[in-house]
Image (tube, coloured by chain):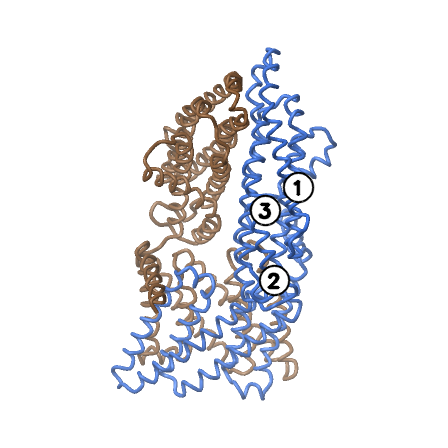
Chain colours: A brown, B blue
Amino acid sequence: VLALKQKVWRLMEKIWKLGVDDPRRIFHCFKVAVALTVVSLFYYLRPLYNGVGGTAMWAIMTVVVIFEYTVGATLSKGLNRGMATLLAGTLAVGVHSVASRSGERADPIIRGVSVFLLASGATFSRFIPTIKTRFDYGVSIFILTFSLVSVSGYRVDELVGLAQQRLSTIAIGGTMCMLISMLVCPVWAGEDLHLLITRNIEKLANSLDGCVAAYFEDTGNVTNKEETSEKSQAYKCVLNSKAAEEALAIFARWEPAHGRFAFRHPWNQYLKIGTATRYCAYCVEALNSCLNSENKVPESMKKHLSDVCIKLSSHSSNVLKELSAATKIMRKSPNMEFLVGEMNNAVEDLQEALKYLPHHLPPTPTEGTEKEQRPPPVSTTTVALIEVVPLVTVASLLIEIARRIEGVSSE
Amino acid sequence: VLALKQKVWRLMEKIWKLGVDDPRRIFHCFKVAVALTVVSLFYYLRPLYNGVGGTAMWAIMTVVVIFEYTVGATLSKGLNRGMATLLAGTLAVGVHSVASRSGERADPIIRGVSVFLLASGATFSRFIPTIKTRFDYGVSIFILTFSLVSVSGYRVDELVGLAQQRLSTIAIGGTMCMLISMLVCPVWAGEDLHLLITRNIEKLANSLDGCVAAYFEDTGNVTNKEETSEKSQAYKCVLNSKAAEEALAIFARWEPAHGRFAFRHPWNQYLKIGTATRYCAYCVEALNSCLNSENKVPESMKKHLSDVCIKLSSHSSNVLKELSAATKIMRKSPNMEFLVGEMNNAVEDLQEALKYLPHHLPPTPTEGTEKEQRPPPVSTTTVALIEVVPLVTVASLLIEIARRIEGVSSE
């Protein structure tokens, strides 16, 4: 019993944390509930019910199905549903009028064949990537509406009137959802994407700093160390954020202008920056595993490279931080070129230091017992090299892309 | 006009390729169309229509909404829908019976408050990760059914009868979908996941081989080179397959026993293998960017390490291939330990070779003009080191995990 109680307690804590972490979630729940209660009025109020009758059901259904967390997702579903219903309804009424005039025997055959063809064709179109990402829901609603209207036309009189009524209740429900989601504490997918990307770049910069610093500075109190190790693990979020970024970018495309974002904000650039950041994170991951390898490097070697390495990593992370700041305000940073120049200088310094490394090596073997330890120096070199080669390329790639987005978004 | 024609032509080609690449997609479209046509019979055949009347609509709706590409997805949606409808329907009928007995004024208030509370609570539960991944659809259907039944109960007489009829048509539509998707050319998410994982491991092995071989063997005809470069880029698929793997694993959990997979097949192990493979791919990515860096390494240096590096990479990729084969047949491979031993020997050889590298270095500076080229040797060292340290750790991790899954799945 106690174990169960503890489990429940922990679950409650988790749920509480979900709400506290992002209070917009709680607002979202109330928004959905309010929307549902409002559309219920179609049933509760006699004059409204007389207007639409049983089709009020479709308003409730629409609210439940299309109200999503972000504005973009709600708009995407709402517009998809609206357009698909309109298109499929028109088509189905057309098929109905042909079928109902062609005799009792041909009627169900015409309906059946048209449903079969359209359903298989539309289902296939869902495999096309562009349609899959943007109109998947619309296609499924298209199949649904077409089948419902054209098939039920066989039994129902006044099909056109019914279809119109249904369309209007769907439109009412959909419009209400979209308005509520946009006007009451809106959660913009675009803004979330923007934040996610800038935070990821920042995290990466901190990780890079943290990794290298932790490696070279072995002294320092424990609490401080834990903090840095937490920071330096932050890049792992970056590795796994691809799916989230893509989903947000898809929704962001549906959103109208809001805050500092125009309607046709170059959301794709964010994805490119995200990808470049991730490629950077792969390098940090490789770097990190080198740093954590068991091979111990003699202190003298470490010292030799320590300064240049730390300098390079801090310059690189400065570039990343500046990039993050530039992305945040969506302006080209005036310091960027200077910082990149400093980073490149640091790269050259490191290369210089490496050049003289072989001359430093020969003395060590004379210590005799250290022989077993000789391969490790290479590890230090690796630290350096990994930073030099891929990081610089990726960083410059990042800069390149950032310049482009800044150019595009400041237009 | 010509440009448009070409565009259409290219689109058609793409669509054709979609079908040819995986003919199961075409079967899927026909399966959906057949299911829809069959449920349409509820409208076409008088005795069936008399049985269910207008609620036949729900059968069509169910088919359109729950019929997904893989069996797992269909089952997950179908069972979610069934359970949620049953639960919400029961609850709503309960609320209805309370509300309808509590006077004309209190009635809509009771209904409204219960809808408000349940909708906001259920919406919030969708933010809980476990519910989000497995029961998201069920929760939305729960809200839908509860609102529909409890609110429409205000106007509709014989609510219980209607709810029962609706439930039974949903059950008929859902059962049909699940049966068709399982019995006619089934697309098992589990099998797809299995294939995806084994192929990814294989791709990674080929990439590793290809990268290292391309770097050390500069000679060779061009067509051959293109082929290897295509192969060595294959690891990029591995980097991006996380979302696909996770989706398949979620669906696979809903699938009954099929082929060589039991009902409670350890699908999570596949995710773990996938993650380990991806970590391996990060290293290959870093390795690749080192190989492609502009720093040219003097041929003599290259030759010195060429043999050991190629040996190590081929041994590593052998281990990966063996792993892939072992995963394919879900048995522990008897050769594995031997291959891992060989790989570890190769690692030691490489470390040995590196140990003598510094002694090789001093002669080069005497050539004077080569001074500018001295840093690059480090690059070769990096190639080696990156392979040695992270790859070996990751590979041994992979082996560790593979042993576990083999243990679990051969039980």
Tags 3 and 2 on a common chain: yes
Q: Within the image, what quadrant is residue A254 found in? A: bottom left
Q: Residue at x 62, y 80 (%)?
A: A107
Three-letter amino acid code at the position of disc 3:
Cys
Q: Chain of mark 1?
A: B
The N terminus of chain A, quarter of image: bottom left
**Residue placed most toward the observer, B33 or B234:** B234
Mark 1 lies on residue: B231
Distance from the alpha carbon under mark 1 to that under mark 3: 11 Å
Tags 1 and 2 on a common chain: yes
Question: Is disc 1 in contact with disc 2, using a CB cutoff of under 8 Å?
Answer: no
**Residue placed most toward the observer, A160 or A362:** A362
Element assignment for label 1: helix
Q: Across the whole image, how many numbered discs are drawn on residues?
A: 3
In front: label 1 or label 2? 2
- Residue A292 horizontal/vertical position (percent): 47, 37
Q: Name the mark on residue B411.
A: 2
Distance from the alpha carbon under mark 1 to that under mark 2: 36 Å
Element assignment for label 2: loop
Q: Outermost residue, left direction? A: B105
Mark 3 lies on residue: B237
- Residue A94 horizontal/vertical position (percent): 56, 72
The C terminus of chain A, quarter of image: top left
Q: Earlier in the sequence, mark 1 or mark 3?
A: 1
Three-letter amino acid code at the position of disc 1:
Lys
